[in-house]
Structures are given as C-alpha cells and as structure tokens.
Image: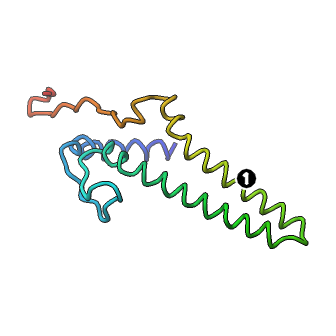
Amino acid sequence: MFMKKYILILSVGLFPYIVSAESLVYKLAAPIPGGGGEVETFTQYVSFLFPFMLSVAAISALVMFILGGIEYTLGGASPERMKSGKERISNAIWGLLLAVFSVLILQTINPNLVIMNLDVEPAGVVTNNNSPTP
C-alpha cells in the first residue's frame, strides 16, 4: 500500500515537468556517437542510442566469443572448462542473434518502434480559467 501511495505522489509531482518537457532542448553530458549533443524529444534520444547499443552488443558478443574460444582451447585436459567454453561461445552467438534480430522483433511488435515515429499529441496548457487550450 505504501508503494502505491509513493508512486502516486511521485507521478503527480513529476507530471508538470513531463508535460512541459516537450518544448525543452536537452544538452547531453556526453554526445552519443552518431548523434548530436542535444536532443529535443525522447524518441530522438532513442533513435541515436539504438544503433550505438547494437554496436555495443556486437562488440561484447565478439569479446565473449573470443574468450570462450580461449577457454575451450586452454581447457584441453579439463572437460568442465571445455564445456564452459562451449557454453560461452553458444551464449555469445545467441546474444548476437538476439541483438541482430531485435529490429525484426520490434518491427513485428509495432513498425513505428523501428522508425522512431512515436509522436504523441501535445498536452494542453492549463490557463487561469482551468480549461485546457491546445
């Protein structure tokens, strides 16, 4: 019960900031490779971040594949180390396949997720007479 009250108070307290955030330009502390140092919307941020994170996933899968190969090669006398190396290699391959096919998975769920076309209608601004204006 306490958690529900906490979430409600937090969401009500942050609502004005979220509504007014659509007109702000955020300056990133460190620019994302392939993107700019400033973003205007969350979808623009994600569109810069998504290819970068795919690159990170591919590089980590390559590193894990190499480490698994080294572990498999050096574990010649120990079947447990060879099995661990094989598992590491297969997990790296599965992770790389998941990263590569994540675009296909997102396309299947909702095509707008891939093209980052998640524009939401702007919320109305409340005036003194408490009637929202577009």
Question: Is residue 92 placed above or below 103 in the rendered structure?
Answer: below
How far across and how far down the image is residue 22, in percent?
Answer: 22, 42
Q: Quadrant of residue 105?
A: top right
- 71 with respect to 28 (left or right): right
How far across and how far down the image is residue 11, in percent?
Answer: 36, 43
Residue drawn at 57 percent across, 60 percent down: 60
- The C terminus lies in which quarter of the figure? top left
Q: Nearer the viewer, residue 70 or 41?
A: 70
Residue at disc 1, secondary structure: helix
Categorize mark 1 by other alpha carbons within 10 Å: few (<14), some (14-19), many (20+): some
Q: Nearer the viewer, residue 82 or 26?
A: 82
Question: Is residue 67 placed above or below 132 in the rendered structure?
Answer: below
Residue drawn at 31 percent across, 61 percent down: 31
Q: Quadrant of residue 19?
A: top left
- 40 with respect to 94 (left or right): left
How far across and how far down the image is residue 53, in percent?
Answer: 46, 53
Q: Which residue is mark 1?
A: 90
Question: Is residue 105 placed above or below 67 in the rendered structure?
Answer: above
Q: Nearer the viewer, residue 58 or 106?
A: 58
User: Which amino acid is tagged 1?
Assistant: Ser
